Image (cartoon, rainbow, N blue to C red):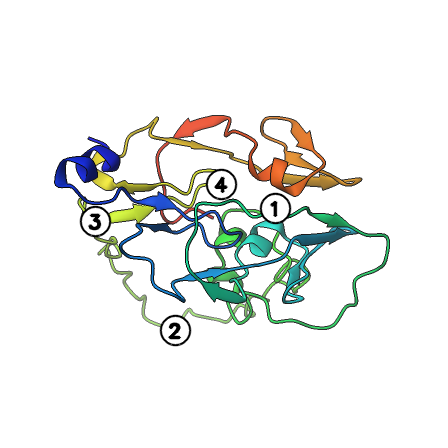
Amino acid sequence: MSTATDAAKSGTAAPVRCQRIGCDAVFTDDDNPEGSCQYHPSAPMFHDGMKEWSCCKQRSHDFSLFLQIPGCTTGKHTTEKPITKAVSTNNPIKATPIQSSKQGVGVDACARCRQGFFCSDHGSQPKPQKPAATDDTNKEPVEKSSVPPPKKRIDINEPRICKNKGCGKSYKEKDNHDSACDYHPGPAVFHDRMRGWKCCDVHVKEFDEFMEIPPCTKGWHNADAV
């Protein structure tokens, strides 16, 4: 049964999704204190493959990492969509160093690297060199552990937020199935002031229109998606 139906029966306000850029949280009018929303108040800028938030000057070449940059302003959640337009500029963006959301994370711990995607933080790093082989003829063999690593335990009744691109819905694992999620498998494509999704070959000019492109694939909700 849907959350809205449960809320209607209990007499409480139905939870809705915040429309501020960079927030995407679920809230109710009864639970919306000042400072609960963290968002970007201005439109993004695009130039030569670089994406930048003009409000806080945070930027990234990687679109997925760009969307993960936390908002720089706090306030109350709202259901009113902000009137913003993405800006494509011919002026080069100054290359002042910023801290990446993945900075300090090794290649083995980076979700994008493990999935085989290009990562702007680790793409240019040299691969670790394997140690030189040594003579182990006189060493006793070491038995490897046959115990598998512990699996992450998930409460099937715990509300989770789907991280699949284009979804962002709240769900419970007990209600999850192979067609519960509508999402974009990606990747996102930016070229000649056009932005879109390679998976469904839909491209638009405005950033707001890009965010409204309907998902093209069904699958399982995933709260740990890349």
Whether residue 187 is visible to the viewer of this picture, yes or no, is no
Residue 138 numbered tag: 2
Query: Is the residue marked by circle 2 packed among few (<14), some (14-19), or many (20+) residues within 10 Å?
Result: few
In-front residue for pair 29/110: 29
Q: Residue at x 80, y 39 (%)?
A: 192
In the image, residue 4 sits, relative to residue 93, either above or below, namely above
Q: Specify the amino acid type for callout 4.
A: Lys
Whichever of labels 3 and 1 marks the residue nearer the N terminus, that label is 1
Whichever of labels 2 and 1 marks the residue nearer the N terminus, that label is 1
Report which residue position mark 3 lands on.
158
Whether residue 192 is visible to the viewer of this picture, yes or no, is yes
- Per the image, label 4 sits on a secondary structure element best described as loop
- Estimate the spatial distance between the alpha carbons at disc 2 and disc 1, rounded to whole Å: 72 Å
Mark 3 or 1: the one toward you: 1
- Per the image, label 2 sits on a secondary structure element best described as loop
Residue 165 numbered tag: 4
In-front residue for pair 29/43: 29
